[in-house]
Each structure stands twice: as structure tokens, then as C-alpha cells.
Amino acid sequence: MKAMFVTISMIILSWACRLTPGTNDTLSTTESFPKTAFPYRLNEPNRSIVLPELLQEISGLSMGYSDKFLLAVQDESGILFVIDQETGSIKRKIPFGKLGDYEGVEIVGKDVYVLKNSGTLVCIRNVDAKEQTLETFNTPLKKENDVEGLGYDAAHKRLLLACKGNGGLTKPLPNRKAIYGFDLVKKTLDTIPLITIGQLEVQKYLALHAKESRVEKLVEFFADRSKFEFSPSSIALHPLDGNLYLLSAVGNIFMVINFKGEVVYMEHLKGKLHKQPEGLCFDSKGGLFLSNEAGDDLPGMIYYYKPLAN
């Protein structure tokens, strides 16, 4: 009886070890949402919010104020907008700078950080006070990096900056996109990217899901392996699953990656609904907000997606 117990224990231990990736495992351990488990129907929003004329070129989005209000910036306008997340109405406008290419926004405690495409960060201190003070941080990133995505990693006290353009700083990164970390304690940018992504990771995901019809347009978009045209315009850290969610208006691609740089989900967004997807953020319960600039017959829009129950 004792021998049988030992044998069964060894089998269970061996089985468990096979399920647990080691620290040296490579891309062969890519985790992926099962087809039925991805928590959002991206082309079927639960709520559609029409934006006012002032926000037709909305470029960055963040959730704040206990999930009651959204924060947004408008391309070429140095104004922070506080938006009712139910109606889209503007509740407050906070001027913070001259005209410029403002692309991302994140609230961190009582402060708000705004990202310019040159990699410069503008911090609006005490955003709820009658008068705000501003502080500017010039990172090593430049216009050629075309930095458009700004996210917040609270656990590691850092901002996440996603490059739409050239990803390299200390060395060239041909045909790869990069995400950098800005330390909120030291107020410095780590010049070594946290994550880079390119055709290798994308093609592995597409191979795993080759039999699914939803990847057909993705296969077509990424067919030329000599280039990588995915261009992240937004990044957000999911509050529940811990993955990074990315948007690319180029190709209308929605991508989810983990901190290993592995693609765990991808989807092509329908152009009739998503004319130019530029911003995304989450509420504390995992509700997804996805913003689009105005285009053709559609005004600027924010779509809300309630997570599906799995």
C-alpha cells in the first residue's frame, strides 16, 4: 500500500512539473486564450458613446475617479478633458500646454501624466486642485520613435511607453516594436526596453490558431515577414489578467501580450465600427473602453465592453 502511494505521488508530481513552465522556457510555452475564453466581443460593444466636436481627434484615454470619469487628450491640443463615462459629456477642461502632438494619458494618484510623440512626459500635479503645477520630463526617446502608447504598471511603480515608430535606443531594433519603462520613483526611463515584439512572436500565435477563420485577415496583414507594420498607438495593463493590451490603427489590429513578449491574443477590428482606434483603458472590474477618432460618416466614439462571464 505504501509503495503504491509513493508511485502515485511521483506520477502526480511529474504531471504537475510538466504543467509548470521553467524559468528558462522560451516561446514554446506561449499561453493563449481559448477561443471561447477571450473576455470581449470587440465588434459588439455593450455601449456606444458619441463624443462632442472638441474630441473628434481623441488620441489617449485613461480611467479615473473611482471608475466614474474618463480622462482624455486630443491630438494637437494641450488640454486634458474629464469625460463622463456614461454620456461622453465633457465635465472639465484643464489646459496644460501649448499645441503639440499629445498621444497618451495616465492618472497616477493625484497626478496625471501626458505623453507627447517625442517621448516627452508632462506631469500635471494635483489635477483636482484649483491651480495645477506642471513638470516636464524629457526622456531619451525622440520623434523618430513616435511614442504613442502610455500605460501604468502600479505594481512596479512605472509608466509603460510603447513606440509606434523605431523601437531602438541603445541599438537598432529592425522590424520590431518596443515598450519602455519610466520609473516613477527615480523619474528616469530605462533605455533597455522591457519588451520587444515582431514577426517571430506573431507568426507563432498565427500558427497555433491557423484553423480559426478569425485570423485570416491577420495572416494576410502579417504575410510579408521582411517587415513588421503593427504600430501600437495605445497600451493598457489589464487590472485582472495582468496582460498588456495594445491597439494599432495601422491594420486595425487588437493585440494582447504578456510580459515575456508572447502574443496571447490577436483580432482584426472591423473597419465599419472602428474607423481609427487610438485609445484604450480599463475600469477596475475589467470593463474595456476603446476610443476611435472621427472618420468618414462616424464621429469620434468611445465603445464600452463588459467582460464576458467565462
Image (tube, rainbow, N blue to C red):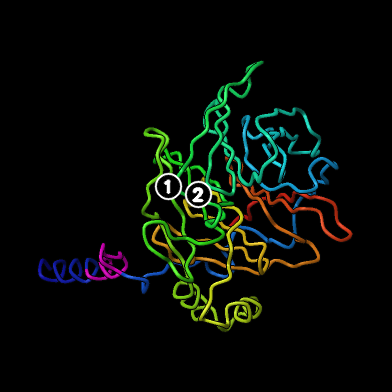
- Residue at the extreme top of the image, as rendered: 130
| Residue 17 drawn in magenta | yes
* x, y percent for residue 202: 50, 73
The residue singled out by tag 2 in the image is 161
At x 32% / y 67%, what residue is drawn?
19
State the SS at label 2: strand
| Mark before the other along the chain sequence, 1 or 2 | 2
Q: Nearer the viewer, residue 140 or 60?
A: 140
Quarter of the picture containing the N terminus is: bottom left
Q: Is residue 290 left or right of residue 17?
A: right
Classify 10 Å Cα crowding around label 2: few (below 14), some (14-19), many (20 and above): many
At x 82% / y 58%, what residue is drawn?
295
The residue singled out by tag 1 in the image is 181
Count of marks overlaid on the render: 2
At x 38% / y 32%, what residue is drawn?
185
At x 50% / y 49%, what residue is drawn?
161
Q: Is residue 122 left or right of residue 300?
A: left
The image quadrant that residue 7 belongs to is bottom left
* x, y percent for residue 111: 55, 28
> Which amino acid type is marked by label 1?
Gly
The image quadrant that residue 52 belongs to is top right
Residue stretch rendered in magenta on the structure = 14-25
